[in-house]
Amino acid sequence: MYLDRALILLLASVGAVSGFAPGFTSRQTSRVVSGSTLFSEEAAVSVDAEAPAAEAPAAAVEEPQSTYDTQIYIGNLSFDTAESDLRAAFQQHGSVTKISMPLNRETMKSRGFAFVTMSNAEETAAAIAAVNESEITGRTVYASESLPKEKVAEGKKKYQAKKQRNEGSKIYIGNLNFDTTEEDLSAAFAAYGDVMDCFLPTDYEGNPRGFGFVSMDEDAAAKAIEELNGTELDGRTLTVNKSLPKGQKATPKQIKLYVGNLSWGTEESTLRELFEEYGKVVDCYSPVDRETGQHRGFAFVTMDPDDALRAADETDGYELDGRILRVNEAQPKGYGGRSNDNDGYDGGDAYDESADESWGNDAY
């Protein structure tokens, strides 16, 4: 009897717990064993353990799809081309999502190139094939896939190298006699290899400017520079070196001194003797009037740097043939400093530095 009461109380307790605990369900049942086996060493009442919740399957990670550059570069555009002209040309081959056409800030017209973006790779390929070498606003345009900046820089470098091979190395020749012709200059350099090009710049009146350029292959140019620099041609000591890009200045190996306030009777030989007291004189030149043949009252003396500085210090204020000399480092024509009281640096190396025509560069 006592056992029956205990069993009833136990069942009531289990029922109460299942009523208030959501985790308990009908699956958590009590198993009652017959009277003879009640409360045996085997569990009289067993409660099924709640099975752990199954883990949700991990979401599949999508592999990023490779992107395709859908931007197209269009070159050789007319300055009058408008965005509407480009859209009309490209929308025939797909959906145009963006047009970028850089403008000149002053004219607000096209700078001659643009970028068009299509919606996908297929449309991009189709548009390039159709538009390349077609005509837009009266110009034959060229379309290609837009390249990253580093690729453009690499391509430009290769182009410049190819251009260098085709055109050869450009040589600068300074301190030329005004009477030297292109034929004379070519003949002097032809002894060292094939002369691809020879050019003597002139001023607005057609007069030679005292310097020139010769193009040869790289090996021949190097040999010509080594052999001809410092030699004489038509009575002038040549300055020969590799031509530098526009705006880039060479470091001169010698210094050219301006000698002003010369007596009309002073000869070049007299001036040379004076400066040779301070070192080797590489060149001594007194510009002359083209009409009268009379020297113009000033001269240029070229020396090694140390010798030139000492000579300038010692001879500035020196009396020669009854005139007090003015000596300082020669400045290119157009230099903004103090005037040398002459018609400018109008000797063999008469360059207008305001036009970026510095000693030995490509500007002309």
Image (tube, rainbow, N blue to C red):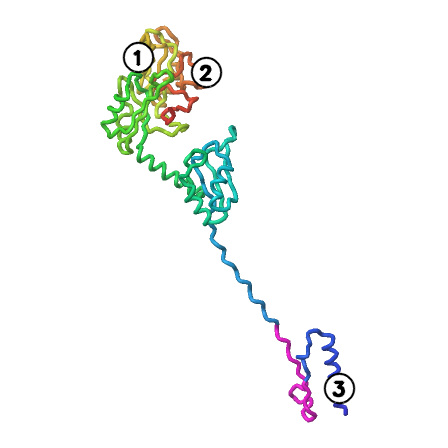
Could you say which quadrant of the image residue 147 lies in? top left
What kind of residue is marked 3? Ile
Callout 3: SS: helix
Residue 359 in picture, x, y percent from top left:
37, 24
Q: Mark on residue 338?
A: 2
Q: Which residue is mark 1?
A: 268
Q: Main secondary structure of the magenta part?
A: loop
Q: Which residue does the image show at 29% across and 33% down from the upper left?
A: 218
Residues rendered magenta in the picture: 31-52
Residue 341 in picture, x, y percent from top left:
42, 11
Relative to the observer, which residue lies in front, 131 or 34?
131
What kind of residue is marked 1? Glu
Quick one: quadrant of the C terminus?
top left
Q: Which residue does the image show at 75% across and 78% down from the upper left?
A: 16
Task: Based on the picture, tell me whether residue 339 belongs to the magenta stretch.
Answer: no
Residue sticking out furthest to the left: 191
What kind of residue is marked 2? Arg
Callout 2: SS: loop
First reached walking from the N terminus: tag 3 or tag 2: 3
Q: Which residue does the image show at 33% across and 18% down from the upper left?
A: 208
Task: Based on the picture, tell me whether residue 39 belongs to the magenta stretch.
Answer: yes
How many residues crowd around disc 3 within 10 Å: few (fewer than 14), some, or many (20 or more)? few
Q: Which residue is mark 3?
A: 8
How many residues crowd around disc 1 within 10 Å: few (fewer than 14), some, or many (20 or more)? some
Residue sticking out furthest to the bottom: 36
First reached walking from the N terminus: tag 3 or tag 1: 3
How many residues crowd around disc 2 within 10 Å: few (fewer than 14), some, or many (20 or more)? few
Callout 1: SS: helix
